[in-house]
Amino acid sequence: MTAKATSQATWEQDVLQADGPILVDFWAEWCGPCRMVAPVLDQIQSENGDKITILKLNVDENPDLAMKYQITSIPAMKVFQGGEVKTTIIGAKPKFALEQDLAAFLG
Amino acid sequence: MRQVIIIGSGPAGFTAAIYAARANLNPVLVASSVEVGGELMKTTEVENFPGFPEGIQGPDLMARMQEQAEKFGTEVLYDDVTELELDGEIKKVTLGSGTVLEAPSVIYATGSAYRTLGIPGEERLSGHGVSWCATCDGFFFRERTIAVVGGGDSAMEEATFLTKFASKVYVIHRKDSLRASKIMQERAFANDKIEFIWNSAVEEVLGEDATTGVLLRNTVGGTTSELPVDGLFIAIGNDPRTHLVHGKLDLTTEGTIWVDGRSSRTSVPGVFAAGDVIDPTYRQAVTAAGSGTVAALDVEHFLAALSDGTTAESALV
């Protein structure tokens, strides 16, 4: 299962109003490490579809959101719950390390 | 059976895979789970790889190398090596998933990892203004002030690249001259947005939740001063990635894996090394690719000799 895209237009509904935990992957076409971590996130989504929803936000197309969440390094992954940021992960990591960082949500 | 396990997915690993696959050695390449492609994944335009007069993007070059390796039958695994058993005739490579790969030969081509400054604030503000990847993070510093630490080619490349976004880029260097190649230096010197701060070392990264500046110490006079910046890009070189083979393979005084003369043969028979992990000097995509070729050819000779000598009790069934 591939992580779906979100955007400024649907942000409120996709992320802030959502019930369960939402992991937003801030990424861009030109970011090599983002390309590397994308398939890992897809895998985590496939295996944990009932526990967490993973969405991708293209920072090129949505610069205002990138600025609002003070992104200065990508890939950056933020887990939202109840409209608030609960966890921030910066940089591409191996699957087991991401799973560790997300243990509270994948439980 | 699998004849060779290649560890590493930069130009050395994939070039070794192309040669090994074409020689019917049935290679498996462990690409790592997130660092597939190696250092070139962090670069933009590669202008010095022969055959690409118009230049090619680093990640595209790596994707093409991988495609070429797979075309001839290389199996690529997106996993990390956690343990190595290199002593016996059959080498065992354990992966993060628990899978154990076995083959009579291994090519070790893990490349190098970026160096850190080891100063206060560096780790805490990593991802909050402190970065090692201009192509990844430069975008977020539009109209801001940035400092780049380093005096080599990668520092010049980063500084020049960052002027696309930043209003001002300082290059901080410990000495009063650069190690970078002439063309990279000239490009940086000619850029109006770049200002050099010579004879200076970064002592501390300043800021609470975000980088606000750096503390500099003059390496000649010893005086300190603060330089307000919004971002700090660190480009002070790389160290060979050898932690998995400490105590298993001989290393050189420079920390690279020791190889026999111009070959790729390490101190353990059947184990070969290639690319930045054996090269303290040149560290180019092309030299790494050449080194990968050497390793694949050495493996071929090694296996041929092994099967000549041990046909009856051969481990190479």
Image: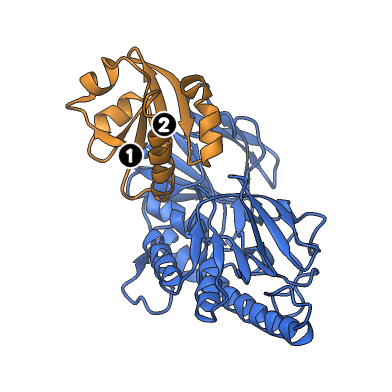
Chain colours: A orange, B blue
Q: Nearer the viewer, residue B163 or A98?
A: A98
- Residue B110 position within the rendered picture, expressed as x and y whole percent measured from the top left: 61, 59
In the image, is residue B135 above or below residue B122?
Answer: below
**Residue pointed to by mark 2:** A77
Q: Which mark is residue A1?
A: 1
The amino acid pointed to by label 1 is Met
Q: Earlier in the sequence, mark 1 or mark 2?
A: 1
In the image, is residue B197 above or below residue B145?
Answer: below
- Residue A59 position within the rendered picture, expressed as x and y whole percent measured from the top left: 29, 37
Question: Which residue sits at x=52%, y=32%?
Answer: A99
Position of residue B19 in the picture relative to residue B249 (left or right): left
Question: Which residue sits at x=36%, y=53%?
Answer: B192
Residue farthest left in this picture: A9
- The quadrant of the image that shows the N terminus of chain B is bottom right
Residue B292 visible at all:
yes
In the image, is residue A22 above or below residue A90?
Answer: above
- The quadrant of the image that shows the C terminus of chain B is bottom right
Chain letter for mark 1: A
Position of residue B237 in the picture relative to residue B194 (left or right): right
Q: Secondary structure at mark 2?
A: strand
Classed neighbour count for the residue bearing mark 2: other residues with Cα under 10 Å, few (<14), some (14–19), many (≥20): many
- Residue B123 position within the rendered picture, expressed as x and y whole percent measured from the top left: 59, 33
The amino acid pointed to by label 2 is Met
Q: Nearer the viewer, residue B124 or B95?
A: B95
In the image, is residue B274 above or below residue B160?
Answer: below
Position of residue A101 in the picture relative to residue A6 (left or right): right
Q: Secondary structure at mark 1?
A: loop
Q: CA distance from mark 1 to mark 2?
A: 18 Å
Residue B128 visible at all:
no
